[in-house]
Image (spheres, grey):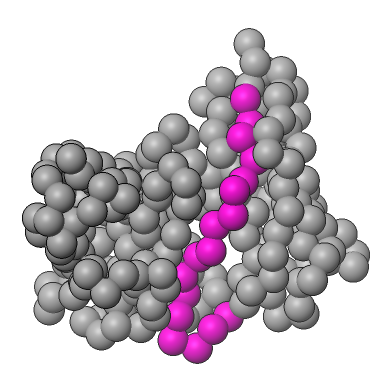
Amino acid sequence: DAKTTQPPSMDCAEGRAANLPCNHSTISGNEYVYWYRQIHSQGPQYIIHGLKNNETNEMASLIITEDRKSSTLILPHATLRDTAVYYCIVRRLQTGANNLFFGTGTRLTVIP
Amino acid sequence: DSGVTQTPKHLITATGQRVTLRCSPRSGDLSVYWYQQSLDQGLQFLIQYYNGEERAKGNILERFSAQQFPDLHSELNLSSLELGDSALYFCASSVAGTSVDNEQFFGPGTRLTVL
């Protein structure tokens, strides 16, 4: 699976959009981009995933560049409850396995 | 609430001891995953079971073992415990084992402290 690079920390004002970048310059054509978050020692929570098209769900939007070498997770209106560590994971479909490899993530702090 | 349950929530034990962590997946999920999160190593995948069979292995020590039972619950056995085994242990489940659209649902974790 391709390696990802994320900034170690970011701040965002409450109510503003939080844009979390992820670099995955060695991504292969059959690898997906996944985002999970972990709120203070709780179990990680799935947010969104995509292959090459932009995706949106009730939690966030995922913007993937045309060359697929980077992506941005957007939380449109950050709240204090969005303070968490956000993990960008690049994963390919593997026969017989579906495990996740977490990096160090980005610690997002939403400021009142 | 993810629907994945883990027991116990906390566990304190001594070096050299053996413990068993238990996980019940979401109803209908066939895959169970175990992850370890320590301060210095971050979140690491240990092992995956799918419908009772081992499917993938990660950075799991030989002192650790797991199994998935016919009712699909899973147990992670940790033996000859060392101080460095102190960590949060998470269980996750998913519907299947190979589909890339398989979102994993994580339990609340078991915090193991080895004294």
In the image, the segment drawn in magenta is A93-109
Front-lying residue, A67 or B88 = B88
Q: In the figure, residue B81 lies in which quadrant? A: bottom left
Residue B105 covered by magenta stretch: no
Residue B29 in the image: state x and y as whole percent: 30, 69
Q: Horizontal placement of B75 versus A49: left or right?
A: left
- As drawn, the residue found furthest toward the right would be A66
Q: Horizontal placement of A84 versus B32: left or right?
A: right
Which secondary structure type mostly characterizes the magenta part of the structure? loop
User: Can residue A90 be seen by looking at this rendering?
Assistant: yes
Q: Horizontal placement of A66 versus B21: left or right?
A: right
Residue A27 in the image: state x and y as whole percent: 76, 72
Residue A106 covered by magenta stretch: yes
- Residue at 36% x, 55% y is B36
- As drawn, the residue found furthest toward the top would be A112
User: Can residue A53 be seen by looking at this rendering?
Assistant: no
- Residue at 13% x, 75% y is B69
Q: In the figure, residue A84 lies in which quadrant? A: top right
Quadrant of the rendering where the C terminus of chain A is positioned: top right
Q: In the figure, residue A85 lies in which quadrant? A: top right
Residue B64 in the image: state x and y as whole percent: 23, 68
Front-lying residue, A81 or B62 = B62
Residue A55 in the image: state x and y as whole percent: 71, 56
Quadrant of the rendering where the N terminus of chain A is positioned: bottom right
